[in-house]
Image (cartoon, grey):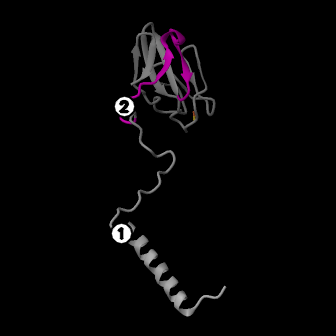
Amino acid sequence: MFISRRQALVNTGISLAATTIAGCATYGKPPAAPAATPGTAATPNDAAVTVKAIASTADIPVGSGVIVDDLVITQPTKGRFNGFSAICTHAGCTVAEVVGASINCPCHGSSFNLDGSVANGPANRPLDAKDIVVQGDSIELA
Ligand code: FES
């Protein structure tokens, strides 16, 4: 197909005009919002206070305790509950068991009493206390 020089100039002019109009169509508009990063969007519940039930009072033996995830919950006397971090204060191992009234760390032999105080070293300070709340039969993190 033969296109004359004149037709080529006309076609070029039409093409430039179309580009100019398209460019003007976006002038003055705010830039598009950046795409949201997955997992970072806020939800309406973010501001809500979340209470997490961690155990039932019936699960905690009187005169002993249990380990739930990274927490130790004890009940030294009926109806009195304590919460502690399960991280041993000696060198950061997780305590492994509560046997009777002894919270035991498997790494270097430290043990703790039901109030979190050190029963036997090498740990030299008590387990870190965690605030818990008893709501009916449920023990929750405060
Ligand atoms: S980390 Fe528990 S006794 Fe050393």
Number of numbered labels in the structure image = 2
Q: Which residue extends farthest top?
A: 78
Q: Is mark 1 within 8 Å of ligand 1?
A: no
Q: Position of residue 8 (x, y in %)?
A: 54, 87
Indicate which quadrant contains ligand 1.
top right
Q: What residue sits right under mark 1 in the picture? A: 27
Q: Quadrant of residue 109?
A: top right
Magenta segment includes 76? no
Q: Report the amino acid beneath label 1.
A: Tyr
Q: What's the CA distance linking mark 1 and mark 2?
A: 42 Å
**Does residue 81 appear to the left or right of 123 in the view shown?**
left
Residue under the point 63% across and 29% down: 106
Q: Position of residue 70 (x, y in %)?
A: 53, 29
Q: What residue sits right under mark 2 in the picture? A: 48
Residue under the point 47% across and 13% down: 75
Tags 1 and 2 in contact by the CB under 8 Å rule? no
Magenta segment includes 49? yes
Q: Secondary structure at mark 1?
A: loop
Q: Which residues are magenta?
A: 46-70
Q: Nearer the viewer, residue 15 or 27?
A: 15
Q: Which mark is residue 66?
A: none
